[in-house]
């Protein structure tokens, strides 16, 4: 069998994190400047049924059977084998790598799952389709996030901008005019599961307040969809700013995130907000293409660990 590899992009939430968990709409876009990759090769000398997983970045170098059920990489391999009805597959090696920051809100977990599901199933001669990959990746996301909305696995699987509502089929955005986003990493890693759990606890303590804030975020997502599909990109900036203010009220921002959002705005970004679970991770700034370097320099001067420029286009 020849070696097979597959990759999956990162993702950024343009509008709608946290509220999307509670049934309100959100917009997410693929981030092609970073990706996860899984390469599957035959294990020539190993006995049938043996699967070895290597992910040097997170210190995994073990046989599948030695990894716990809760390990997301092992879960992705097991999910692929189960979907294909294989108990004893040909011996194989799975090597995973990623340029997506971990615990940064860019969908690293979902991207790794999607890459593994695609590579393993293709190697075994029965590639899973997008619907199957997304559904299986969602199940694995529950290991990462506890109560995920499904937005990460969906936008990463299909690698297209989406208007997402939990429990509904993907609704792909018709991007009328390309726009440029600048992603800046605070360097503070915060697992999404923790931020989601904190918001859930606060919601349970005061449902009326949090339902009102979630609804406001959902309204912003609806307005953002109209802006994207009509090509009125300049309208997105104020919507992103408003979304960040509400996320501050949800107490999922942080001094590091707020500092980068302010730096982006002062450097000429059209709008900026945290992206992802919050309490660390990344911010997202909408910029004119010819100002991306200026804004990037300002963000790094304000403490950003790194920046990524990505274009959301008509594809």
Image: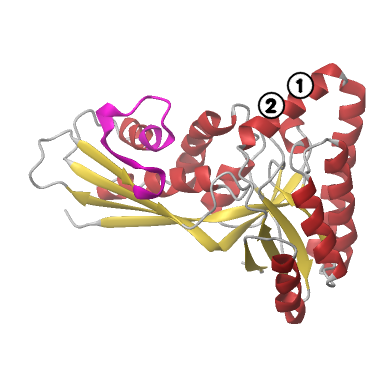
Circle 2 residue: 197
Quadrant of the image occupied by residue 19 = top right
Residue drawn at (80%, 55%) of the image:
259
Residue 232 % position (x, y): 86, 68
Identity of the residue drawn at 69% across and 26% down: 197
Q: Rounded to the nearest whole Å, what is the CA distance between mark 2 and mark 1? A: 6 Å
Q: In this rendering, does residue 76 appear at all?
A: yes
Q: Residues within 10 Å of mark 2 (few under 14, many from 20)?
A: some
Task: Tell me whether circle 2 and circle 1 mark residues in contact (CB < 8 Å).
Answer: yes
| Residue 210, disc | none
The residue tagged with tag 1: helix, strand or loop? Answer: helix
Percent across and percent down for residue 263 are 81, 64
Image position of 193 (left or right of 258): left
Q: Which residues are magenta?
A: 56-76
**Residue 225 in view:** no
Q: Which residue is mark 1?
A: 201
Who is closer to the viewer here, 157 or 176? Answer: 157
- Nearest the viewer among 67 and 15 is 67
Query: Which residue is at a point 23% across and 46% down the rendered structure image?
Result: 93
Q: Report whether 223 appears left or right of 154.
A: right
Residue drawn at (45%, 46%), measured in percent from left and top?
112
Inspect the magenta stretch and tell me whether residue 167 lies in it. Answer: no
Q: Is residue 26 left or right of residue 306?
A: right
Q: Give whichever of 78, 282 is nearer the camera.
A: 282
């Amino acid at each position: 069998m020849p070696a097979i590899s597959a990759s999956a992009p990162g993702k950024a939430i343009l509008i709608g994190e946290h509220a999307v968990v509670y049934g309100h709409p959100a917009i997410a876009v693929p981030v092609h400047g970073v990706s996860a990759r899984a390469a599957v090769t035959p294990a020539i000398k190993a006995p049938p049924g043996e699967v070895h997983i290597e992910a040097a970045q997170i210190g995994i170098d073990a046989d599948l059977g030695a990894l716990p059920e809760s390990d997301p990489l092992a879960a992705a391999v097991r999910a692929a084998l189960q979907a294909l009805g294989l108990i004893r597959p040909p011996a194989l090696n799975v090597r995973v790598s990623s340029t997506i920051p971990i615990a940064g809100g860019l969908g690293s977990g979902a991207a790794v799952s999607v890459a593994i599901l695609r590579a393993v199933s293709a190697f075994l001669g029965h590639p899973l389709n997008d619907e199957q990959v997304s559904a299986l990746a969602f199940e694995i996301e529950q290991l990462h996030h506890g109560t995920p909305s499904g937005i990460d696995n969906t936008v990463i699987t299909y690698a297209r901008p989406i208007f997402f509502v939990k429990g509904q089929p993907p609704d792909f955005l018709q991007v009328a005019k390309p726009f440029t986003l600048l992603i800046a990493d605070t360097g503070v890693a915060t697992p999404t599961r923790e931020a989601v759990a904190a918001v859930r606890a606060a919601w349970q303590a005061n449902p009326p307040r949090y339902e009102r804030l979630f609804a406001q975020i959902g309204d912003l997502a609806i307005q953002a969809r109209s802006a994207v599909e009509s090509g009125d990109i300049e309208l997105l900036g104020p919507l992103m700013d408003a979304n960040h203010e509400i996320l501050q009220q949800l107490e999922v921002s942080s001094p590091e995130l707020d500092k980068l959002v302010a730096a982006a705005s002062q450097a000429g970004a059209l709008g900026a907000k945290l992206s992802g679970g919050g309490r660390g991770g990344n911010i997202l700034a909408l910029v004119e293409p010819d100002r991306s370097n200026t804004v990037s320099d300002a963000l790094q001067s304000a403490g950003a660990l790194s920046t990524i420029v990505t274009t959301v286009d008509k594809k």
